[in-house]
Structure formats: C-alpha cells, structure tokens
Amino acid sequence: MENKSTASNFIKTIMQEDLKEGRVKEVVTRFPPEPNGYLHIGHARAITINFELADQFGGRTNLRFDDTNPLKEDVEFVNSIQEDVKWLGFEWEGLHYASDYFEEMYERALVLIRKGLAYVDDQSAEQIRETRGTLTQPGKESPYRNRTPEENLDLFQRMRAGEFKDGERVLRAKVDMNSPNINMRDPVIFRISHTHHHNTGDKWCIYPMYAYAHPLEDAIEGVTHSLCSLEFEDQRPFYDWVIRETEMPHVSRQYEFGKLKIAGAIIGKRYIKQLVEKGVLDGWDDPRVYTVSGMRRRGFTPEGIRAFIREAGVSKSNGTVDPRMLEHFIREDLKLKVPRTMGVLRPLKVVITNYPEGQVEMLDTEVNAEVPEMGMRQIPFSREIYIEQDDFTENPPPKYHRLYPGNEVRLKAAYFIKCEEVVKDAEGNVVELRCTYDPETKSGSGFTGRKVKGTIHWVEATRAVPAEFRLYDALVAEKGADEENEEEGAAAGDDILKGINPKSLEIIQGFVDPSLKGAKPQDKFQFFRHGYFNVDSKNNTPEKPVFNLTVSLKSSFD
C-alpha cells in the first residue's frame, strides 16, 4: 500500500520494544466491530491504525465480528462491514466471529465458577444497577454472592439449558464490590436471551457480555496488541482479570488511544437512524454523514481518507479536527487522478450571433492539465451555449472581470466573446445574452492581439446533457452538536432536528458536457471552477446523471 506513515507514536514504540525484547514473536492485531450498524470515520481510523501498524512489522490483522448481542445484530451489517474494510484498501488475515467461541467462553466461565470467582445472581438488572455504587460510594454485595460453586454450576448449566426466562438470572464475575473502578464491581458476564442468532441460530439462549467476551476472543486468536479507544481504559483491569483468571494460555494486552472526531459531524447510530426515519437523510449512506458508505457515495477516496488518518496521528487523548482537514486530503488525492471537464450548474443561454448557424466544431482541450499523460479530448462548440448565471451581471462591481454589457471574456478552450445585448422576460429577469465572437482568438491559435482578464466555462447548448447537482454543506448548523452521545450513554435527543442545517443539501438542475452522458456511479470529475464531483449511486440515470459535490476546489486547510 502506498505511502504508509513512518511517523512514530506510542503504540508503534510499544510494538517495537515488545519485538526487540522478545515479549512477542510477531505483531497480531484485530478490528472487532459489532455488526449492529454501518461503519463511520472513527471505525475507518481504527481499521487503518490496526492494519497498517501490524503490516509495518510484518504482522497480521484479523477481522472479527463481536456478535454477542443478537437483538441488535444482522447479517446485513456483517456484509456491509466487510465491503467497507475492503474498500478502504485492507485485507484481513482471518475472518472470525465471537459466536464461534461461545463454547469456549462457556467453558471458561465454568473455570471461574469452580474457582469461586463467578456466581449466578437472581437480582433484576435494575437491582444490580442500584447496588453497583457510585464513583464515591462502594457497591453492595448481592445476597446471592456467596452461593457455593456447586450451586452456581447447577444454575448456570440450567441457564444454558433454557430453564429460565430472559432477565431471570445472570452470571456475574466475583471480583470486588469495593473497588474504586466500577467496572470491577462484579460485572455481569452472561445473560439470558432467548433470541435467534444470525450465526449460531437457536443453539444458545445465554450470551456473553462484551467486557467478558472481548479479552477471551483476543486470547483465543493470539492477538498481541488489542487496540481500543480511550473509553475502554477503565475496563483494562477487568480485561486482564478475565484472561488471568480463566487461565488462558495466551496473554493479550490492551492499549488505548484517543478518539478523533470531526467537528459538527453526526456519526452516532441512534442519531443517524432518527434522521433517516424522519426523512432528513435518504439512508445510512447519505453523503452528509461520515459513515464509510456515505463518504464513498460522496466521492471521498480510500487513499485520501487513509492519508488524513495518518496525518492526524495517534495520541493518548481525544481530539476534534475541522472537516476541512479531511477534505484537503481528498482534494489532494483527486487532483491528479480525475478528468477535468465543464458543467454549468445554473445555466444562462448565450447566442453567438455572428457564429454560422447550424455549424458545430470540435475543440481540443486537456483531460487534466496537471497530468499531460492523460491526453486530450474534444468538446463541441456552436452558436448556442450555456454559461453560469453568476458569470454575468448588468451592473459590474469594481474588479469584476466576467461578462457584462460591452465586456469581452474568454470562453475556456474556445474563443473571446463580447456581450452585445441582454434579453429579459416580462418580469425583468435576464433569460438570454446575445454576443459576438472573434474567430481569430481560438484557444491554442497563438493569438496575441489583445488580452482579456476573465475566463469563464460553458457547455454547448444543443448537445448538453441535463444533469442534477447536489451541493453539500455541514449537516449541523451550530457548533457544539454532539456527534456520538449515544455511545457515551446518552439517549438520542428529541431536539436533534433543531440543530440541522436547512442548507446542508441544495439540489439544482444544469447541464454537462455530452461526453458525460452515461456516466456510471462512482465516476469522478473535476468541474472547472466548481469542484470535484462524484456520480451518485442511487439516483443516477444514463439520460440524466446526478453529481454529488465531493469537495470544492479551494482548500482553507493549507
């Protein structure tokens, strides 16, 4: 893979030392998403960090689905996650499911019970929460905490056999109800759920909790460096406890790094779901959200996303970056890859009165002026063309160098034209311009007779292809809207719609060069003076392509 970052970070340093001192023979990492939704930019960062660090040391990375909660999981998400990881440019060493290890997780729970380190609790979920304590007060022991190992073994086996109802009993680790770390206060490690599982069917009616399952999965797969986001730091003592007390032969180590958020982005699953259901977004792949599928539909490239992630780096603290930083790297990746053409978003008709009627000539222009090897292409030119409404004004302000009555401009790759007459409708709106052209000023002819200060783009009117353009702005109108509250324990707010930018999507109708007829989804172009656009994957038709604005031409990040 291209240009992997050689920059150092604390995780890379740990890996180097572990290899040097012989603590590990090879670096093994994993990306362990729960298949309960679509991946977003945060997941893309975790994917890149795990895969690229392992690859730099000649190691390997597994893709593992943490499918321990069948109520929320679906094979749809399993498939979409695999597609996203591949699209980002990575290939996993092994494809695993937490559910493949349910039997061993059950057996390891029996180890804990026999050692007196796990017990079956008959309290309700609410009672367990109430007795857990707070940051300043210790928890209270369950009245069932001192059941004998024999009694616990019997009850746990009956839980597996399906004798009890959902929520009737749980298995808890017996650790320390006085621990200052709430995660160590006898956490639940198995619960009852008579739910069909996408991978194991109806084989199981008890399911392990994530905090218990995750360290076992890492140990089973031989993961050496289990990389997590910072909110899992407080769970590391229990991670180590599980591996140690279940007597796993391989010891994995957990390391945490800070999250990186995009300012104003909404990536929390509950929020996106709510916006989809209310019709604000047209799906999880709406180009205004930073899901991987949304970024792909907008036209972001995996190379640009990876370059952004490398530049952002890895640290021990959370951070937030301006979305323009990400857009900068997308722009830098696209500018040397995509063809450049012309599209008119808000058309104004121009009739060149001294150009021969019925004549169409083909003009030569570069596919991409910065990449000569991409060659040349031809565009039609005739008596009638469309220009942008913004490229004409009747009353020009100072230093206005585009078209106005009596002024002359160059048409990109064509001729000089001069505005001679303005045609208006009954309401006084400008509907047509009548201009003349100078045939001696053809682009590439070497004409040096005079100069003009303005160059504008255009498309030939009789062959132009009708097109729809979708222009995007920030989805959140005000700064401070939270991106991921739901993953931090807060419910999705009822006021989510109040913060939505009403101008986050603008749909306009215009025209593009005839060579773009039949453009396929994910085809990318730079439209002269407008920006980079991607052909939409949902609404596009061969007769009328739909273009999503990927990024503008100018970057304010540099």
Image (spheres, grey):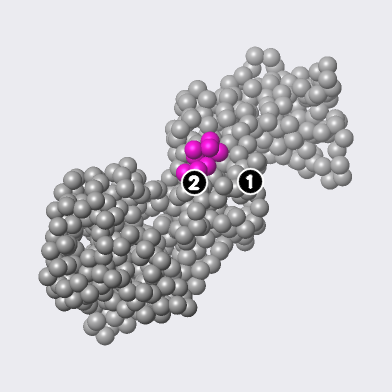
- In the figure, is residue 233 to the left or right of 431? left
- Magenta stretch in the rendered image: 273-281
Q: Amino acid at mark 1?
A: Lys
Instruction: Name the residue carrying label 1.
Output: 498
Residue plotted at (69% across, 14% down): 357
86, above or below 61, in the image:
above
187, above or below 31, in the image:
below
Query: Looking at this rendering, what residue extends furthest in the front direction?
Result: 143
Query: Looking at this rendering, what residue extends furthest in the top direction?
Result: 358
Q: How many marks?
A: 2
The disc, 1 or 2, on the residue closer to the chain's N-terminal end is 2
Local secondary structure at mark 1: helix
Can you tell which of label 1 and label 2 is closer to the viewer? 1
201, above or below 103, in the image:
above
Residue 409 x, y percent position in the rendering: 76, 36
Answer whether residue 407 is visible to the viewer in this image. yes
Instruction: Name the residue carrying label 2.
Output: 272
Whole-angstrom CA distance, mark 1 to mark 2, is 14 Å
Q: Amino acid at mark 2?
A: Ile
Residue 304 x, y percent position in the rendering: 48, 55
